[in-house]
Amino acid sequence: MEEKTNYGIVDPLNVLRVVAALCVFFLHTTIFTDVSFFAERDATFIFRTPAWAGVWIFMFLSGYFAGKGFISGKYSLSVRGFLQYYKRRFVKIIFPTLCFIFFCVTVIQPDFVPNNPDFLPKVLICIG
């Protein structure tokens, strides 16, 4: 019997989550972008996104997907299930983010970490 897989199927809720994240990203790019360059081309609408709505949508869908993992049986409602859930969140989200922050800080300002010894512990416990 053939096993049916969902490979290649795009979940529309994940697409909506990406659009919500892009709304926030585009609004934040106005800080670093010369918007007058785009004003001549009538393309400034790209940067005027409802970032507040993007945050709400992103957080709502993230909570939905987290709960869906427990409801669907991917994680059990036990200590072991919660540890497995948080372990996967750490490996997929937190650890890459910490590596990216550390890489950026050491490349952009190599003297920052030696001059601020309390930086790494603060970042590791997410209060930095």
Image (tube, helix red, strand yellow):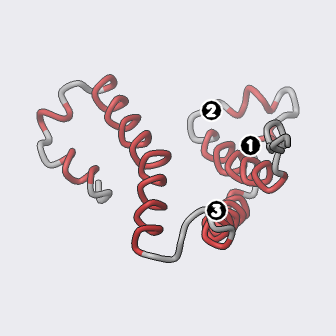
Q: Nearer the viewer, residue 51 or 7?
A: 7
Q: Position of residue 16 (x, y in %)?
A: 79, 53
Q: Quadrant of residue 87?
A: bottom left
Of the image marks 2 and 1, the number of the one nearer the N terminus? 2
Of the image marks 3 and 1, the number of the one nearer the N terminus? 1
- Residue identified by numbered label 2: 33
Q: Residue at x 67, y 63 (%)?
A: 65
Q: Residues within 10 Å of mark 2 (few under 14, many from 20)?
A: few
Of badges 3 and 1, nearer the viewer stands 3
- Residue identified by numbered label 1: 47
Q: Position of residue 27 (x, y in %)?
A: 67, 47
Does residue 40 lie above or below 81 as drawn? above
Question: What amino acid does circle 2 point to?
Answer: Thr
Q: Position of residue 123 (x, y in %)?
A: 28, 50
Pointers 2 and 1 in contact (C-beta within 8 Å): yes
**Is label 1 in a helix, a strand or a loop?**
helix
Q: Residue at x 27, y 57 (%)?
A: 125
Of the image marks 3 and 2, the number of the one nearer the N terminus? 2
Of badges 3 and 2, nearer the viewer stands 3
Q: Nearer the viewer, residue 56 or 88?
A: 88
The total of numbered circles placed on residues is: 3
Q: Position of residue 75 (x, y in %)?
A: 55, 65
Q: Nearer the viewer, residue 86 or 40?
A: 86
Drawn side of residue 79 relative to residue 112, left or right: right
Question: What amino acid does circle 1 point to?
Answer: Phe
Question: What amino acid does circle 3 point to?
Answer: Ser
Drawn side of residue 28 relative to residue 45, left or right: left
Which residue, as the protein is rendered here, is positioned at the far bottom?
A: 77
| Label 3 to label 1: alpha-carbon separation | 24 Å
**Is label 3 in a helix, a strand or a loop?**
helix
Q: Nearer the viewer, residue 1 or 79?
A: 1
Q: Residues within 10 Å of mark 1 (few under 14, many from 20)?
A: some
